[in-house]
Image (spheres, rainbow, N blue to C red):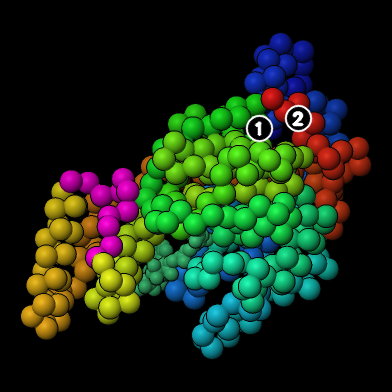
Amino acid sequence: MPLVAHNALPTFERLRRDGQNILESDRALQQDIRELHIGLLNMMPDTALTATERQFFRLIGQSNQIAQFYVHPFSLDGLQRSPETMAYIKRYYESFNEIKTQGLDALIITGANVAGADLSQEPFWQPLKEVVDWATTQVTSTVCSCLATHAVMQFRYNQQRRPLGFKRWGVYPHRVVARYHPLVSNVNTLFDVPHSRFNEITRAQFEAVGCHVLAESAMAGVHLAVSDDGLRLIMLQGHPEYDTISLLKEYKREIRRFISSDRDNYPPFPDHIFSVKIKAILTEYRERVEYCLIHRQTPPEFPEARIAAGLDNTWQDTAEGVMDNWMGLIYRVTHSDRRIPFMDGVDPLNPLGLSFK
Ligand SMILES: CC(C)(COP(=O)(O)OP(=O)(O)OC[C@H]1O[C@@H](n2cnc3c(N)ncnc32)[C@H](O)[C@@H]1OP(=O)(O)O)[C@@H](O)C(=O)NCCC(=O)NCCSC(=O)CCC(=O)O
Ligand SMILES: N[C@@H](CCO)C(=O)O
C-alpha cells in the first residue's frame, strides 16, 4: 500500500525519487478502492498442477495483507492431460471466454514441461498466443514464467530461446541491475531464485528488442525483464514461486527416471540446495540404488522426509516483495472497470511514467 503525502515533508519527495510508491493526498482521496482480479493460466503438467496453483496463490496472498485478491485459474486446450485432471479443470477452473468477458487487472502465465525443440510446433502455441494477444491490449500487466517467457519472446519479439546443452538447475544468487524500476527498487539488491530449465534467452536478446533487464545472475543469466513500456509484460526465467521442496521433488523424479531406464545417467545434484550433510546422505543413497540395480534388487525408498527437513528457503521474502510491488503498481494505474487496462490519463506506452536509465 502506498504512502500518502499528506503534507509537505521533504522526505516524501526524496522517497519518490528513490522509487517509492507515494500518492498525493488529493489523488489518495479520490482513489477508487476495490479488489484486484488476477488470472492464473496454469500450463504445468498434471503432476505439478495443484502444487503450482498453491505456489502462485500463496505468493499473491502473502504479498499484501490488506488488499483483497480474487485469483481466477484457467488452462488451455492442447496440453497433455489425464481424464482426472481434465475433470478437475472442468470443475474448478474458469474458461478463457468467461475471463475475457469479466476482465482482469493482472495475469500470470506459468511455465510448462515441453520436450520438443521448436515451441511453435506445440499444440498449445495458438491458444497461448491468443491469450497473450488479448492480455497485451486488455490486461494492465502480465507475468510470464519460464517457458511462457520463451514463447512470448518468440511470437511477440521474434527472439528464439537457445538450448543451454545442459540443465540450469538449482538456486542461484541474483543482483538487481535496474534499481530505478519500482518493481525492484526496494527489495534486497542481492537475492536468490530457483531455476529449472534447459533453454535460455540472453540479456542481449531482451535488450535487442527494447526490453529492460531488472535482475540477473552471473551464473544463471537473466531472471527478470520487462517490456519496453516498463509494465505490460513482466518476464521471468527463474521460479520465485517454487516451494522449498520443489527442486527436491524434481531431483527425486530424475532418480526415478534413472531407475526405470528413462534416463541414462544418475542425475547430478541441483546447484546450491543441499548441505554437505545432505549430500552425504544422497551419495550413500545413490550407491545403494546402483548396487540394487546391478544385483537386480528393488532400490530402497528415496529418503525424502529426512532431506526435506534440512532444506532452506532463501528466496521467498524477495519473491513476495516483488509480487507486492507488482500489485501496487497495477492498482495505481488500472481502471476502476476491470475490463479496461488503464485509468484515464495513464500513458499506455509508459504507464508508470518512468525515465528509463
Ligand atoms: C517433480 C514432479 C514430477 C513431482 O510430482 P510427483 O507427483 O511425482 O510428487 P510426489 O513425490 O509423488 O509427491 C506428491 C505431493 O507433492 C506435491 N508436489 C508435487 N510437485 C510439487 C512441487 N513441484 N512443489 C511442491 N510440491 C509438489 C503434490 O502436490 C503432492 O502433495 P499432496 O500429497 O500434499 O497433494 C512434479 O512436481 C513436476 O512435474 N514438476 C515439474 C515441473 C515442471 O515441469 N517444470 C517445468 C517448468 S520450467 C519451464 O518452463 C521449462 C523451460 C525450459 O525447458 O527451458
Ligand atoms: N487505479 C484505481 C484503483 C482501481 O480501481 C485508482 O487509483 O483509483
Residue located beneath label 2 in the image: 354
Residue located beneath label 1 in the image: 182
**How many numbered marks are there?**
2
Asked if residue 352 shows in the view, the reply is yes
User: Is 206 covered by the magenta stretch?
Assistant: no
* In-image side of 277 versus 148 (left or right): left
Say whether disc 1 or disc 2 marks the residue closer to the N-terminus: 1
Image-quadrant location for residue 173? top left
Residue 310 percent across, percent down from the top left: 24, 51
Which amino acid is tagged 1? Pro
Q: Are marks 1 and 2 in contact (CB under 8 Å)?
A: yes
Which region of the structure is painted magenta? Answer: 266-276
Near mark 1 (Cα within 10 A), the count class, few <14, some 14-19 or many ≥20, is: many
* In-image side of 356 versus 289 (left or right): right
Near mark 2 (Cα within 10 A), the count class, few <14, some 14-19 or many ≥20, is: some
- Main SS of the magenta segment? loop
Label 1 vs label 2: CA separation?
Answer: 9 Å
Which residue is most to the bottom?
A: 83
User: Which of label 1 and label 2 is nearer to you?
Assistant: 2
Front residue of 41 and 316 = 41
| Image quadrant in which the C terminus is located | top right
Residue at 38% from the left image edge and 53% from the top image edge: 169
Asked if residue 58 shows in the view, the reply is no
Front residue of 74 and 154 = 154
Which amino acid is tagged 2? Leu
